[in-house]
Image: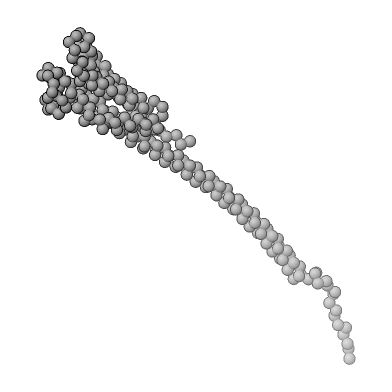
Amino acid sequence: MLILPLAVAPDQSFWDQPVVLAACVTGTVAILVLIVNAGLNTWMHQGKLHADRELSREKFSFDKESAERKFRLDRALDDWRRKSAFAEQELASFYDTASRISAIRSPASFGSESEDRIGRENESDILRQQRDKYYPIVRRFRENAEFFNAFYSKRHRALALFSQGAEAPYVDIWRTLSKISVAAGMLMREDTYAPNQAAYDHRRQMEQIIWEGMTENDAIAQAVLDAIAAAEKIFRPAIELPAIDLS
């Protein structure tokens, strides 16, 4: 019987196997890919976080600036509304005051304006006729006293809203009213009708104050016009919507 020797495979290391080598390479590549992907993902995530933070800062700054601008605008508009409403009202009051002063100083009068004068029935005919000429001025003042007092009281708010000097037109009007009132009161005094030149001259001076148009250059009418012009300079600009600087 013939016995053949068995063929023995050559001795090979485990790592030398082609399958093992392929698996190692594949695994290494996969690990490298994972590492690279993880690094990229981390980098991209950090970049996104940084961008989001910058965007949040910019949005916060923009919102803050917008809120501040809106606040300044609202405050400026509110200040303008208050000043504009007051200025428009007061300009109308100045025009109304001028009209009332003109009506008070009108030389024309009705007989009924003197009928309620106290004591006229106890006066001589001449004295009664003289006083009846001037009494309408006194009566008209009394009828407009409430308006004039309310008008003059606004000078304090004008001073608060428009600073120093805003009360000057009110004071000028009040001084003019006082001159008319004092002149009318003096013409009602009995000694004003003394039979001498000094009394006559004094009476003529008082008449130029209480009556409009007695002289070519009416100082009282001009004082009223000057006060209105001063009020125009103070209040007229406030009525127009100003250019508001929001920077």
Asked which quadrant contains residue 231, the reply is top left
User: In the figure, is residue 183 to the left or right of 164?
Assistant: left
Residue 191 screen position, x and y as percent = 21, 15
**Viewer-nearest residue: 26 or 42:** 42
Q: Is residue 32 visible?
A: yes
Q: Is residue 44 above or below residue 182?
A: below
Q: Residue at x 42, y 41 (%)?
A: 74
Of all residues, the one furthest to the front in this rendering is 122
Residue under the point 18% across and 23% down: 135
- Residue 206 figure quarter: top left
Q: Nearer the viewer, residue 154 or 129?
A: 129
The percent position of residue 126, horizontal first and vertical second, equals 12, 17
Picture coordinates of residue 73, whole percent (x, y)? 43, 39
- The answer to whether residue 169 shows anywhere in this view is no
Colouring convention used in this rendered image of the protein: one colour
Q: Residue, x 17% and y 24% (percent of image)?
A: 136
Q: Is residue 73 left or right of residue 45?
A: left
Q: Is residue 61 left or right of residue 45?
A: left
User: Could you tell me which quadrant the N terminus lies in?
Assistant: bottom right
* Outermost top residue: 197
Residue shown at the point (60%, 53%) measured from the top left: 49
Please tell me which residue lies in front, 91 or 24.
Answer: 91
Name the quadrant containing residue 123.
top left
Query: Residue 60's spot in the image, x, y percent?
Result: 53, 47
